């Protein structure tokens, strides 16, 4: 049976990026910080100390940042400029505070942005199938689903150096070897390895603007809304075995 949080004890307010970074790096599944424009904290009244005055306890963080790409707004609609769009880059709430708390927090962040950043008309966010995410929180808060795979310039690949070894994320591959080019990787690695295409991210859109602007933008969306995905994985990538001859052969 689901337990819902008493939202009357919750509050949302702006927090410093340093506080947000500390929470995200320590607790978010990525353990990575990124460029952030607005960071909001979720607080709950903490009355566990009956002999002291109640105080607020930070139990969640939401971060919004500028989307990557000069044409990020126009990739949604020709009516949107990149300065009118933010990306939801991080959201984290500690466990055991109720099943509705993330949705409530997200909704309150919309209200905060409408009041404090009125120039923002749209929000985008991505859910990563590699992490088993289909975007449940976005579906629960009525975001528009725009699909999967139309927003990535080229396929990315994870690889492993042993048949039963751990998979190396594409970002790590590039950092380690300097390229994703297959022939380059063969020369750098020098022995047989395995790779698989990484599932492309799901993209969601939420419009913050008023009804009149919303209607115009909806009519000019480049990627029309699609039914929500129910399975995080749209396909199970085939694992490719890349046979590599000895290093000496490449440097003859």
Image (cartoon, rainbow, N blue to C red):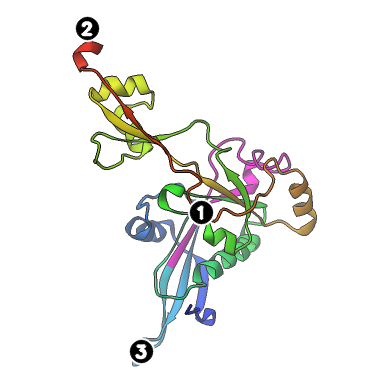
Asked if residue 61 is positioned above or below residue 77 in the image, the reply reads below
Provide the residue span drawn in magenta.
60-88
Asked if residue 91 is positioned above or below residue 158 in the image, the reply reads below
Which structural element holds mark 2? Answer: loop
Q: Residues within 10 Å of mark 2 (few under 14, many from 20)?
A: few
Image quadrant in which you'd find residue 245: top left
Image quadrant in which you'd find residue 60: bottom left
Asked if residue 178 is positioned above or below residue 136 in the image, the reply reads above
Which residue in the structure is indicated by mark 2?
Answer: 252
| Identity of the residue furthest to the bottom in this view | 51
Per the image, is 65 magenta? Answer: yes
Q: Nearer the viewer, mark 2 or mark 3?
A: 2
| Identity of the residue furthest to the top in this view | 252
Q: Is residue 187 left or right of residue 197?
A: left
Q: Is residue 38 left or right of residue 51?
A: right
Q: Residues within 10 Å of mark 3 (few under 14, many from 20)?
A: few
Disc 1 or 3, which lies upstream in sequence? 3
Instruction: Judge by depth and name the residue closer to the eye, 62 or 152.
Output: 152
Residue 129 horizontal/vertical position (percent):
46, 49
Which label number is shown at residue 231?
1
Per the image, is 125 magenta? Answer: no
Which residue in the structure is indicated by mark 3?
Answer: 52
Instruction: Judge by depth and name the residue closer to the eye, 80 or 174.
Output: 174
Figure quadrant of the C terminus: top left
Total marks shown come to 3
Which structural element holds mark 1? Answer: loop
* Mark pair 1, 3: CA separation: 47 Å
């Amino acid at each position: 049976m689901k337990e819902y949080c008493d939202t009357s004890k919750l509050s949302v307010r702006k927090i410093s990026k340093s506080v947000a970074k500390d929470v995200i790096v320590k607790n978010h599944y990525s353990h990575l910080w990124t460029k952030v424009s607005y960071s909001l904290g979720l607080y709950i009244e903490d009355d566990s100390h009956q002999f002291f005055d109640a105080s607020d306890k930070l139990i969640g963080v939401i971060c919004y940042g500028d989307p990557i790409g000069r044409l990020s707004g126009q990739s949604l609609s020709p009516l949107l400029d990149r300065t009118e769009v933010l990306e939801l880059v991080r959201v984290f709430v500690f466990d055991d505070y109720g099943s509705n708390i993330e949705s409530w927090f997200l909704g309150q962040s919309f209200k905060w942005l409408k009041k404090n950043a009125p120039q923002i008309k749209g929000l985008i966010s991505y859910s990563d199938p590699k992490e088993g995410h289909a975007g449940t929180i976005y579906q629960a808060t009525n975001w528009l689903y725009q699909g999967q795979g139309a927003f990535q310039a080229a396929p990315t690949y994870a690889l492993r150096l042993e048949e039963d070894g751990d998979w190396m994320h594409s970002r790590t591959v590039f950092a380690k070897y300097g390229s994703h080019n297959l022939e380059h990787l063969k020369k750098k690695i020098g022995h047989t390895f395995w790779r698989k295409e990484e599932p492309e991210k799901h993209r969601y859109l939420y419009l913050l603007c008023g009804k009149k602007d919303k209607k115009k933008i909806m009519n000019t969306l480049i990627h029309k809304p699609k039914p929500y995905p129910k399975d995080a994985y749209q396909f199970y990538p085939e694992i490719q075995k890349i046979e590599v001859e000895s290093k000496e052969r490449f440097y003859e």
